[in-house]
Image (cartoon, rainbow, N blue to C red):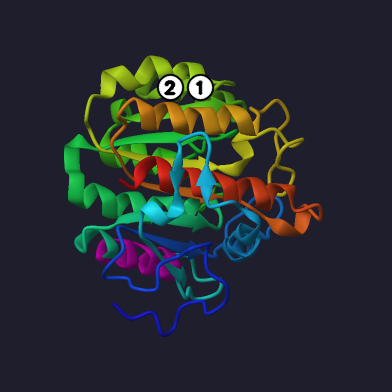
Amino acid sequence: MRFDDAYSGNVFIRSHPDYDASQAVIYGMPMDWTVSFRPGSRFGPARIREVSIGLEEYSPYLDRLLEEITYFDAGDIPLPFGNVEGSLDAIRSFVRKVLADGKIPIGLGGEHLVSWPVIQAVYEKYKQDLVVFHFDAHTDLRDHYEGYPYSHSTPIKKVCELIGGENVYSFGIRSGTKEEFVWAKEHMHLYKYDVLEPVKQVLPTIGNRPIYLTIDIDVLDPSTAPGTGTTEAGGITSRELLETIHYMARHGANVIGCDLVEVAPVYDHSEMTQIVASKIVRELLLAFVK
């Protein structure tokens, strides 16, 4: 697989140089064309990679080293600036190839709409068995935003319509319209405010079904992660998010792909958000790449 046109800057710490020999593929989706408040998440993937140099390669939580797994950093997918449909098509095509090659896709966003074409590609492979876990401050259940169906406020509604709301689980939610919360109560599984405890309740009911995990960095409280476009007070701590990932790993969650989105470095000059995001990516790798 060639990546001649991809981002040529830094790669995530200890990335393997050989795509074919790798178990997982990290890739960036530098798109923020539809954000409703503050843009800038298109710069998130690059900065998450850059600050990863500050990470240790050992996870004391999981007692694993990054050298025990192989992952290839493909850089950022080259997206047509401002072209929403063209960008979604490019992401979908890229992830289809990664899945066809038997590798775990690990995406870095970018606004949350980028998860939509990824989940479309994942659903093509896993069909009715697929389950989506969604960690976020926001419901993301709108049909449209100001009349346009493509928005970072719409991806989870699209996912529910594609795979069935009964297969979609949202955790940590604390913001959305009243209509979205009413719709969620009737059509899907939505857990407000917390993440770890409801995941503990849900995971035994999933069995070995394939899980796609999408994490919006704003599931964290702004005191932990201020560098995002739409901050929302009352979020979880980074410790709770890490504990949730570790719980899923230790209890056999069959996570077949994941993404981390909405990191916008320009709003966090302390780099706290980017550093937290980078550590989350390390733990996702060590938790779910066997």
Q: Is residue 85 above or below residue 239?
A: below
* Residue ID at (66%, 52%): 274
**Residue 45 seen in this snapshot:** yes
Q: Position of residue 67 (x, y in %)?
A: 42, 56
Mark 2 Cα shell of 10 Å, populated few (<14), some (14-19), many (≥20): some
* Residue ID at (58%, 62%): 49
For the magenta stretch, what is the residue range?
85-97
Q: Position of residue 106 (x, y in %)?
A: 41, 54
Report the amino acid beneath label 1. Answer: Leu
Residue placed furthest toward the bottom:
4
* Residue ID at (28%, 77%): 1
Q: Examine the image and state in which quarter residue 134 appears.
A: top left
Relative to 59, 248 lies left or right: left
Q: Position of residue 46 (x, y in %)?
A: 60, 66
Relative to 285, 264 lies left or right: right
* Mark linked to residue 84: none
Q: Is residue 182 above or below residue 290?
A: above
The residue wearing badge 1 is 196
Q: Pick the residue in front: 180 or 81.
A: 81
Secondary structure, mark 2, is helix
Relative to 268, 42 lies left or right: left
Q: Pick the residue in front: 268 or 120.
A: 268
Is 165 covered by the magenta stretch?
no
Report the amino acid beneath label 2. Answer: Val
Q: Position of residue 103 (x, y in %)?
A: 27, 58
* Residue ID at (70%, 34%): 232
Q: Is residue 51 above or below residue 213?
A: below
The residue wearing badge 2 is 199
Question: Quick one: quadrant of the C terminus?
Answer: top left
